[in-house]
Image: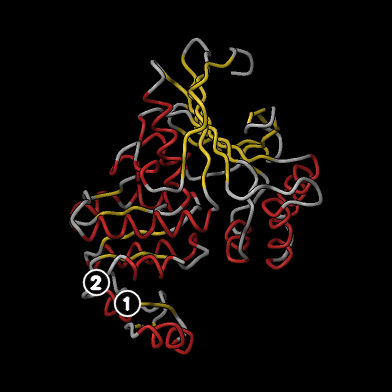
Amino acid sequence: MLLDRLLAAGIEPVLAGRDPDRLAGQAQPLDLEYRAFSLTDRSATDAALADTEVVLHAAGPFVDTGPPMIDACIRTRTHYLDLAGEWPVFAEAERRSPEAVRAGIMLMPGAGFSVVMSDCLLALVAARTTGAVKLRLAVSRPDEISAASVRSMASLIGPTVLVREAGALRERAAGVLRHDVDFGAGLAETTAVCWPDLITAPMTTGIDSVETYAETDWLQRLAHAASASASRWLNGRTRALAAGLFPLGLPGRKPAAGFTLVAQAVDRWRRTSSLSMRTLGGYAVSAITGETIARRVLEGDWSPGWRTPAGQFGADFALGLGCATLIGRPQLLSVQGA
């Protein structure tokens, strides 16, 4: 899907990966160049990137592959983009930002569904709320998920989740912190999770207290809490299975295609403003945003160092791509629960 959009935009990417046979099978029918190398081989990675202007990294789990690719991009002065949704990669990009500035390149993890959609929505609600001191993001249940995404989330699941309070990341017990959110069909319960907006939202909005949530039902909450507790001792294969229970869901309501995102901004008087967005499915959105951002960077629309999508391209960026719309008007919610 992403490759099709790149080709339609007139971009002929060089395909890269570890398996030369698989790469050849993808690249040769399209008459594209390909380069096979392992990120554990520093010399081979640097050689592969030597004449590359932009890397659009799509090989997860990003918590494992992101840091070495960021390192290689800094060494070779190559812009780094990825489709990651794993918060440690964003923290790594933030940490390496001064080096990227010196190298004259941009680091932008989250050029896909996560975090383009949520980053723009949070920027919009923050801009429309005077004196906001706290942000919340809630995401409805996914309609689709790949095995790679399950593996990525399995690598991050644990007995605690993170929230950002006054600029600091703090741990809370997994499955305990909950918040009721209206995704359009009445209040639904959501549970705190570690979305990358914990890292990106303060950079984009200047608001340094952030909580992120995912819609759950009682069975998913149970699976989340159980898998988080079990992650202390389960082996990798079982951890992947346990983590998969949470995003994939268990018997119950079948989610509609796409996602609903709800962003809330809370002011110092605990008044809460809410703004909602409806998107296409995550993989369709990532193809659109990934291609658009890669093209814009190739055209010169970039800034040195770590950057967020809304920070670089504006809060309205997501709304101009044909894959997201705002729902209704901004709402002022009651003070209760703020």
| 110 up-or-down from 62: above or below | above
Q: Which structural element holds mark 1?
A: loop
Q: Which residue is found at the position 51% from the left and 27% from the top?
A: 328
Q: Which residue is mark 2?
A: 52
The residue at 46%/16% (across/down) is: 267
* Within-10-Å neighbours for mark 2: few <14, some 14–19, many 20+: some
Q: Nearer the viewer, residue 19 or 172?
A: 19
Q: Residues within 10 Å of mark 1 (few under 14, many from 20)?
A: few
Q: Earlier in the sequence, mark 1 or mark 2?
A: 1
> In the drawing, does residue 278 fall left or right of residue 132?
right
Residue 240 in the figure: left or right of residue 329: right
> CB atoms at circles 1 and 2 under 8 Å apart?
yes
Quadrant of the rendered structure where residue 66 is? bottom left
Camera-nearest residue between 112 and 177: 112
Identify which amino acid the numbered label 2 is placed on. Thr
Residue at image position (68%, 46%) is 159
Left or right side of 40 for 96: left
Residue at position x 42%, y 40% in the image: 119
Whether residue 40 is situated above or below residue 156 in the rendered picture: below
Work out which quarter of the rendered image holds the C terminus and state it.
top right
Amino acid identity at mark 1: Val
Q: Quadrant of residue 120?
A: top left
Q: Is residue 285 above or below residue 3?
A: above
* Residue topped by disc 1: 14
Mark 1–mark 2 distance (CA, rounded to whole Å) = 9 Å
Front in this rendered view, residue 148 or 187: 187
